[in-house]
Image (cartoon, helix red, strand yellow):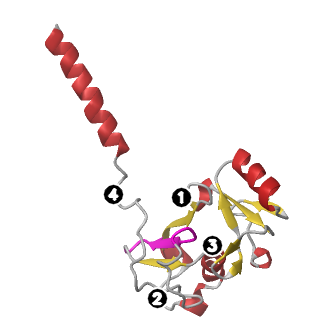
């Protein structure tokens, strides 16, 4: 009986550990020291609190020094690369303002028109959750909240 309880407990621990491991291919890539933003040419690694990442289905990726350059790239990919199209995009991540962790763009709200500046000035600030978005706008202003689907070229500062 004690052995059975121990096995059930051990199985639960193994399951919890297994579930905590990121799914292979879904842990966002991190920029290396020499990685540059394909839009503005800036080195990305010096700005870890603003990094955005596009991962492509072939395993390659593009790093950006902030969400606005990532959106510029997505809205006009042909201008920045001949090798990739929107159909090649597998995952898109941005660094969430409060946690400074990379998150899927679908998991954040982008705040426009705030007083928070990124490496290239005014920025679309990614914030997770409605409560955090409200707190951010109270503390830093902002003209609006947009989901990734709602961002248009005219929203990019």
| Relative image position of residue 66 (x, y in whole percent) | 60, 75
Distance, label 3 to label 1, CA atoms, is 12 Å
Residue occupying the point 70% across, 63% down: 149
Q: Counting other residues with Cα less than 10 Å from the Cα at mark 3, is it few (<14), some (14-19), or many (20 or more)?
A: many
Query: Which residue is label 1 attached to?
Result: 103
Distance, label 2 to label 3, CA atoms, is 21 Å
Query: Which residue is label 3 attached to?
Result: 67
Residue occupying the point 54% across, 88% down: 42
Disc sitting over residue 83 in the figure? 2
Residue occupying the point 78% across, 69% down: 115
| Relative image position of residue 20 (x, y in whole percent) | 36, 43
| Relative image position of residue 31 (x, y in whole percent) | 42, 75
Instruction: Please tell me which of labels 1 and 4 falls first in the chain.
Output: 4
| Relative image position of residue 50 (x, y in whole percent) | 58, 71
Label 4 near label 1: C-beta < 8 Å?
no
Task: Say which element carries label 4.
Answer: loop
Q: Counting other residues with Cα less than 10 Å from the Cα at mark 2, is it few (<14), some (14-19), or many (20 or more)?
A: few
Q: Which residues are magenta?
A: 48-58
């Amino acid at each position: 009986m004690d052995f059975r309880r121990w096995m059930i407990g051990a199985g639960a621990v193994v399951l919890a550990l297994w579930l905590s491991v990121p799914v292979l291919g879904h842990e966002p890539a991190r920029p290396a020291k020499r990685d540059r933003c394909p839009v503005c040419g800036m080195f990305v690694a010096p700005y870890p609190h603003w990094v955005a990442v596009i991962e492509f289905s072939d395993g390659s990726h593009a790093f950006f020094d902030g969400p606005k350059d990532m959106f510029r790239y997505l809205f006009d990919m042909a201008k920045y690369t001949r090798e990739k199209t929107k159909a090649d995009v597998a995952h898109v991540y941005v660094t969430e303002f409060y946690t400074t962790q990379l998150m899927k763009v679908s998991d954040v709200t982008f705040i426009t028109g705030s007083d928070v500046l990124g490496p290239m000035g005014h920025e679309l600030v990614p914030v997770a959750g409605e409560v955090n978005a409200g707190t951010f706008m109270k503390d830093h202003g902002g003209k609006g909240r947009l989901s990734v689907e709602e961002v248009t070229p005219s929203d990019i500062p």
